[in-house]
Image: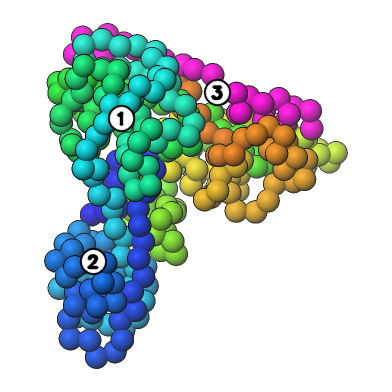
Amino acid sequence: MIDALPPDDDSDLTVLTARVAPGAARLDRALADALPELSRARIQALLDAGAVFLNGAVVAAKAKPAPGDYEIVVPPAAPAELRPEALPLAVLFEDDDLIVIDKAPGMAVHPGPGCETGTLVNALLHHCATLSALGDPGRPGIVHRLDKDTSGVMVAAKSDRAHAGLAALFATHDIERTYLALTRGAPSPEKGRIETLIGRSPHDRKKMAVLKSGGRLAVTDYVVQRVFGRPAKASGAPLAARVACTLHTGRTHQIRVHMAAKGAPLLGDPAYGSGAPAAPVRAALAQSGLARQALHAAVLGFVHPVTGEALRFETPPPADFQALERLLTEL
């Protein structure tokens, strides 16, 4: 199923819309006629994968055509060739089996449509003599991902044994992962656990959403570390906050979706930050130069899958995040 994406995916999917008129004999033929860029064989494969939707519901592979507007979610094609590139990398740890880096904001983890070069994979291919060949051949060594515009600590596998071990740790959630976020307003209460189902939004297939049914379990613990711009009324909500979020699952855009669901979307988030922040916060955003979601993967801890050594890495947010936080303290 297309919804079963790896954690922290950048959601670089293409969503196509095709209108099927009444009286169509075959759904795959009708969709292929409406979308000449996709062959009937490709349409059928996407139907088999559960990537075709009508009114927000998955269309069965052998379903009879019903009139309406269908949405087809097309995953990115793997690049034909992966090229090593001499890009700067902030390496926190490295041995024969794995490498831990502090990923800069704006760097995609792997190549995709419109982003064939300049990715972490390109940089790792240049830096490392070998990368694990397990998993997707278009994403060697990649066990988990961060959004392109999310900064912070990541681990990649150089050996197949490390890849298998790390994948098992992520599957059982035996990984310590804490993120720092700057939010519009603050979640209430100031400390808690968010436990929901997360899946593709029925209204926008490129986005994730909290669902009443379907999707996958997502669990986030959060604590408000600091508030900014406390209003005059003691009962009033702050203008912004710094929130530490600890992941117990790794769903696509999990923190961004959960904070938005709590009424405190991440500042600078182009997808989930619906509603403008207060004027002083908007001014701080503009002055800081932060042009992305204010999210940083600050802590990553795990047991080395080969040596058994307990490893824990913590990095401060990058300059744009810190600049915004300094400006928020002046509110």
Is label 3 in a helix, a strand or a loop?
loop
Residue extent of the magenta highlight: 303-331
> Label 1 is placed on what type of residue?
Val
Q: Does 307 lie within the magenta span? A: yes
Using the rendered view, name the quadrant where residue 58 is placed. bottom left
Is label 2 in a helix, a strand or a loop?
loop
Residue at figure coordinates x 32%, y 36% from the top left: 110
Residue 329 as seen in the image, left or right of residue 264: right
The quarter of the rendered structure image containing the N terminus is bottom left
Residue at figure coordinates x 65%, y 42% from the top left: 184
Asked whether the beta carbons under mark 3 and mark 2 sit within 8 Å of each other, the answer is no
Q: Does 153 lie within the magenta span? A: no
Q: Residue furthest right?
A: 232
User: Is any part of residue 219 visible from this angle?
Assistant: no
Does label 1 or label 2 sit earlier along the sequence?
A: 2
* Residue 96 in the image: above or below residue 317: above
Using the rendered view, name the quadrant where residue 292 is placed. top right
The percent position of residue 200, horizontal first and vertical second, equals 38, 56
On the image, numbered disc 3 is attached to which residue?
Answer: 317
Residue 153 as seen in the image, left or right of residue 49: right
Colour scheme in use = rainbow
Q: Which mark is residue 121?
A: 1
The percent position of residue 144, horizontal first and vertical second, equals 31, 32
On the image, numbered disc 2 is attached to which residue?
Answer: 38
The quarter of the rendered structure image containing the C terminus is top right
Residue 116 as seen in the image, left or right of residue 273: left
> Label 3 is placed on what type of residue?
Pro
* Residue 295 in the image: above or below residue 269: above
Is label 1 in a helix, a strand or a loop?
helix
